[in-house]
Amino acid sequence: MAIRRVLYKPRPSFLGITSVGAKGWVPSLALWGAGAGTAVALLMSATPLFKNDVLVKIPVIGSYYEDKTLASDRPF
């Protein structure tokens, strides 16, 4: 009976991270990213520049953040 040699194939990696190793981190990183994005949107929603450049342009909730104050009532 002949002994067969084991042939190892190298896995492609990027910075030492393989696709198998990254697959386990993707759901966790997605949840942390969504939480961080939500926190930034919540904390920056009072800033007029962020409100006009980002929040007003969101399709579903953009009308909530539109400034409906009359021009005569605005200080600037």
Image (cartoon, grey):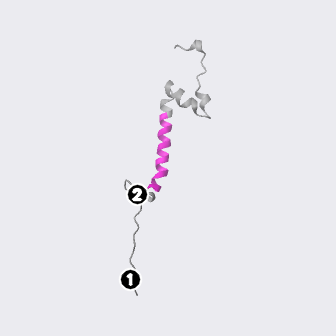
Disc 2 is placed on an element classified as strand
What's drawn in magenta, residue-wise?
22-40
Q: What's the residue type where badge 1 is placed? A: Ile
Q: Residues within 10 Å of mark 2 (few under 14, many from 20)?
A: few
Disc 1 is placed on an element classified as loop
By secondary structure, the bulk of the magenta-drawn segment is best described as helix
The circle drawn on residue 13 is: 2
Judge by depth and name the residue closer to the eye, 2 or 50: 2
List x then y, in percent, for residue 16: 37, 56
Q: Is residue 34 magenta?
A: yes
Q: Residue furthest toward the top?
A: 72
List x then y, in percent, for residue 50: 50, 28
Q: Is residue 47 magenta?
A: no
Judge by depth and name the residue closer to the eye, 5 or 39: 5
> Against 14, is 35 above or below?
above
- Look at mark 1 in the image and give the residue it sits on: 3
Q: Residue at x 51, y 24 (%)?
A: 48
As drawn, is 37 to the left or to the right of 60?
A: left
